[in-house]
Amino acid sequence: MTRKRTPLNKQQQRRLAALFTSFLRGKKTLDKLIILVLSGVIMLAFAAWPHKEGRSNESGGHDAFHGQNGQTYRCALKKIYDGDTVTARCNGQKGQQEIRIRLAGIDAPEMGQKPFGEESKRELGKRLGQNFDMHYLGPDYYQRSLGTLFVYGRNINLQMVEDGYAFAYDSKDTPAAYKQAEKNARAARRGFWHKGKNQQPINPKIWRRHHL
């Protein structure tokens, strides 16, 4: 995940407005009009610019997948980014297409959560192999393809949680089976959970709030 741009708070907005008002004092009417127009153009250009944290970055520059929600498509693995994101070449409705896939229902440690990010990435590679089936669930906000990945009928998303190498995604929409799988993995001390409490990873959602 990438850093989100933090908007100005109300106090900062008031200070900026006061500085701008002070700057305009003493200017001629035409000068003021020119400054206001230029400011508007700059703000519009900034809003339209494809920032690093926007869709193009999260989707890896890939177009949205040409597939039907709820259908399953055959894919060949290209790259593993972390324990819940991969790039693959999949057979969509318009032929083969390279897409970035976000494994639905799970949240793996970020790569900055050392050593857990690397460990989760490595364990996903062991379970996924070079070819798999993706049950397509549609695009997410960043145009990544949300999917459940299967190898010989085995749900890899769920297995990552069952084996203790990913969290169930913190959302009311996450299937109960994933949340129960995390509880079971913790109780059985599998994967990350075999270590003492102070050596276990924090939930990636919490980690991102403080580091991204």
Image: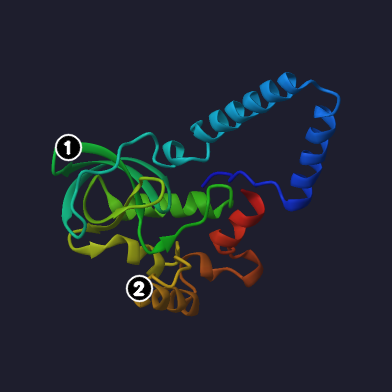
- Of 96 and 46, nearer the camera is 46
Q: Circle 2 sits on which residue?
A: 175
Q: Position of residue 105 (x, y in %)?
A: 38, 64
Q: Position of residue 126 (x, y in %)?
A: 34, 52
Check the image and report above or below for 106 versus 59. below
Q: Position of residue 88 (x, y in %)?
A: 28, 41
* Spatial separation of the CA atoms under disc 2 and disc 1: 30 Å
- Of 57 and 177, nearer the camera is 57
- What number of labels is visible? 2
The local secondary structure at tag 2 comes to loop
Q: Residue at point 74% right, 52% down? A: 10
Q: Which mark is residue 96?
A: 1
Q: Residue at point 43% right, 78% down? A: 184
Q: Position of residue 26 (x, y in %)?
A: 86, 24
Chain-order first, disc 2 or disc 1: 1
Q: Residue at point 17% right, 55% down? A: 72
- Quarter assignment of residue 160: bottom left
Classify mark 1: residues with Cα within 10 Å, few (<14), some (14-19) or many (20+). some
Classify mark 2: residues with Cα within 10 Å, few (<14), some (14-19) or many (20+). some
Q: Is residue 171 left or right of residue 114?
A: left
Q: Amino acid at mark 1?
A: Gln
- Quarter assignment of residue 199: bottom right
Q: Amino acid at mark 2?
A: Pro
